[in-house]
Image (cartoon, helix red, strand yellow):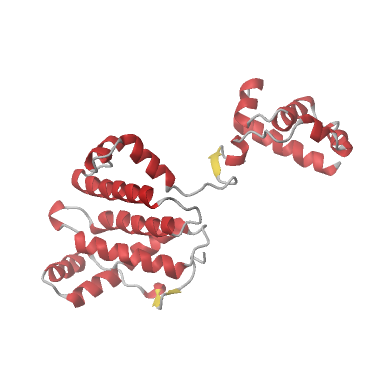
Amino acid sequence: MAMTKVEICGVNTSKLPILKNDEKEELFKKILQGDEEAKKEYIYGNLRLVLSVMKKFGNRGENPDDLFQVGCIGLIKAINNFDVSHNVKFSTYAVPMILGEIKRYLRDDNPIRVSRSLRDIAYKALQAKEKLTHLNSKEPTIDEIAKEIDMDKSDVIFALDAIQDPISLFEPVYHDGADAIFVMDQVSDDKNSENLWLENISLNEALKHLAEREKYIITLRFFKGKTQMEVAEEIGISQAQVSRLEKSALKRMRKYM
């Protein structure tokens, strides 16, 4: 997604106004009195909140115009439901609302289909979460959410898990300041047996050019199908070190294959 796009849905994002606190307060007073022009000005003055939330989804390849429109719906909902008596900044209340609206849109547009009943339970749980967060100024527990919507805790957990976005195998899960460890590094390989690998003579020759520890790591990872964490525990080093040695060994092997 081109997050550097200047014009989104006909709005020049480089020229969006920045409202001062006193201007926001004055406009909101007019909004509470039913002034639609003040509401439009308030929306326009807070569109930067929508843009800031959109950046969280910059790597999904979604159309920025679509996300912007959905984010604006969340912004309008936040304005309609904002209670000034709680003494909370509007942005603090609005950002989760915008985020929730975009997440709901992405879930509905997800290529992995989830049954309607599960989605309904999940959405009720998410609405209850927003409500309880707003009331108690803290994120509720699963038990509290389940009690709020009068459902079993296990059903709520199952429904919320069902609507989660799939994770890429190349999603980084850990950084140690150098190489990253990806999801695929923590998944064992049960398909590649020793017999299949040893059929390739060039691979055997490449293995001969590795140091003993590197050869042992490659054997455990690809011949035995162990995860990097299992290898790390077996040879007494960190998973980050296993990841580095594995990548170095594979790079060296490619030169001889």
| Residue 26 on image: x %, y % | 15, 69
Q: Residue at position x 35%, y 39% from top?
A: 155
Q: Choose top left, top right, bottom left or bottom right for residue 216.
A: top right
**Residue 164 in the image: x percent, y percent?**
44, 47
Q: Residue furthest left?
A: 33
Residue nearest the viewer, comparing 158 with 240? 158
- Determine which quarter of the picture holds residue 79: bottom left
Q: Determine which quarter of the picture holds residue 233.
A: top right
Examine the rendering and report whether any part of residue 238 can be seen. Answer: no
Which residue is painted at 23% across and 58% down in the image? 90
Quarter occupied by the C terminus: top right
Q: Is residue 170 visible?
A: yes
The residue closer to the viewer here, 34 or 49, is: 34
Where is residue 98? Give x, y as percent: 33, 59
Q: Residue at x 29, y 72 (%)?
A: 44
> As displayed, is residue 82 above or below residue 167?
below
Q: Is residue 100 left or right of residue 205?
A: left
In the depicted view, which residue is nearer to us: 240 or 69?
A: 69
Residue displayed at 53% across by 62% down: 61
Number of numbered discs present? 0
Q: Position of residue 6 (x, y in %)?
A: 46, 73
